[in-house]
Structures are given as structure tokens and as C-alpha cells.
Image (spheres, rainbow, N blue to C red):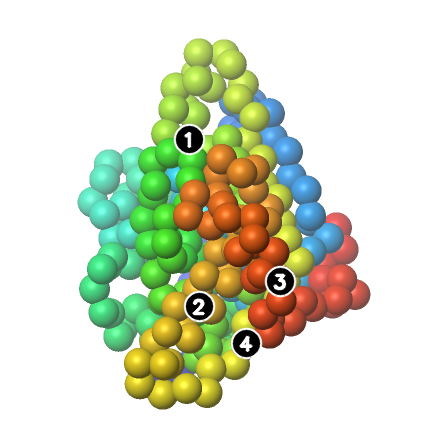
Amino acid sequence: MTTSAYTIPPHTRALRTILRPIFRGVFHILSNVKITGRENVPKSGAYLIAINHVSLYEAPFILAFWPIAPEAAGAVDIWSRPGQSLLARLYGGIPVHRGEYDRSLLETMLNVIKSGYPLLIAPEGGRSHKPGMRRALPGAAYVVEQAQVPVVPVGIMGSTDDFLERALHGERPKIEMKIGRQFRLPCIKNKGEARRVARQRNADLIMYQIASQLALEYRGVYGDETELEGSQNDEWREIPPSQTHQP
């Protein structure tokens, strides 16, 4: 697969500079924001930000509060919804056709990473609509395999479908972001079916690292404590904090 330089248009950079503080303010007004693990954000370079995906609120939450503005991949449905479509276009999101092999999309995501930018992605491939993660699709593991970049696992809690309704009724619900230590996935040397199985295992490893940042009720199919502990024994490699962003 060929790659080329990925560039962010000046107008998109300018709009992000305007939009991000506005959304930070909105989240602070409507909810009780808690963020832990900022010290785990890489100082520079490309990496994959992997998140759990309950509702439509996780991506705006992370894009608003991440130390820099990452690139973001989201379901193509968003581009056809009033309001969401406008925000996605203004931010410069990357549309994803769920459940389809999209070579152009994969090339774009690899171009983003190989051009040195962080990329936000939800390995589940869609919203769960309630706390509890679903089995990951192998796409995130494929991108990491091709780009050879670290993964930063992020757990989001409190971003349920009723978040905005509760906020507008004056509840100020708690929304929390827990940022884990970046790590590298095991290299895949297999071929054929064995390679497919190994890639899915890597996708599961990403999810187990996200699960380690979440309360039990948010872990879903990755809630088995023995599997969670077992994932720590795989050949993934955690990256020392000295190589991460200091707020």
C-alpha cells in the first residue's frame, strides 16, 4: 500500500483553534469534567489514540481536551446528520464506511500517521449505546501493524446517550477521561489465517488496555479479570513515562 504526505489545510487548523476551546467551555459548563493521565500523552510524533465508544460524545470530548488537536476517524453516517455533519466538516474528520473494506480510508489513516500526526480511532467500529465494550474489529491493529506506531489507550466514562439530556436538566453529570501509558503491540510474523488470528489478538490487546482504564461495568466483553491480567503477559511493550508529554 502506497503512502503520501498528509497535510492539514490552514483553514482547518484555524477552525480547530477556535472550536477546541469553545467545546472545552461547553463541557465544563454542562458537566463535571475529570481527566487523569495527562502525563501519559506522548511528547511528539505519531501514535494511535484508541478509545471505547458508547455514544457520540467521546470524540468531541477527547478532541476538545487532548493537548494537541489529533486527526479523527468517524463513521460516515455523521456526515449526513444535521449539526454533526457541520462539526465533522469544520474539524476536518476522516469518514469511515463501517463494515466495508476501504483501501482509500486505510491509505489516508496511514498517511496521517506516517506524516507524524496522532490519530483518534474507536476499535469497536461503532457505538455500543450503553456502557460495555463490544469485540474490536481488526482494523486498528492493522493500522498499527502497517505504521509501527505506539498506542495510547483511553477510557471514557459518563458519556452515555442521555449525557446531554441530563446536562440540560441541570444535573452536571460527571464525564471522565483516563489516559493510559502508551505501548507497542507484538509484531506479527504469521501468514494467512494465522496472521488474521494474530491481528485480531492484537486488536483485543488494545481493548484490554482500554478496559484497564475503565470501571467494570464499562468493560463489556473485555471484563474478564483473568483475561485482563493475562493480556499483561503478552509481548506488548509499555513505553517509559520519560517519552511522554508533561503538561
Residue 156 visible somewhere in the drawing? yes
Mark 1 or mark 4, earlier in chain = 1
Q: Secondary structure at mark 3?
A: loop
- Residue at 51% across / 63% down in the picture? 205
Q: Is residue 97 above or below residue 112?
A: above
* Amino acid type assigned to the residue bearing label 3 in the image: Gln
Residue 201 numbered mark, or none: 2
Task: Please name which of the two marks, 3 or 4, marks the residue nearer to the observer.
Answer: 3
Q: Which residue is most to the front?
A: 226
Q: Secondary structure at mark 2?
A: helix
What residue is disc 3 on? 232
Q: CA distance from mark 2 to mark 1?
A: 28 Å
Q: CA distance from mark 2 to mark 3?
A: 13 Å
On the rendered structure, is 125 left or right of 65? left
Q: CA distance from mark 1 to mark 4?
A: 33 Å
Q: CA distance from mark 3 to mark 4?
A: 12 Å
* Amino acid type assigned to the residue bearing label 1 in the image: Thr
Closer-to-camera residue (192/27): 192
* Amino acid type assigned to the residue bearing label 4 in the image: Pro
Q: Secondary structure at mark 1?
A: loop
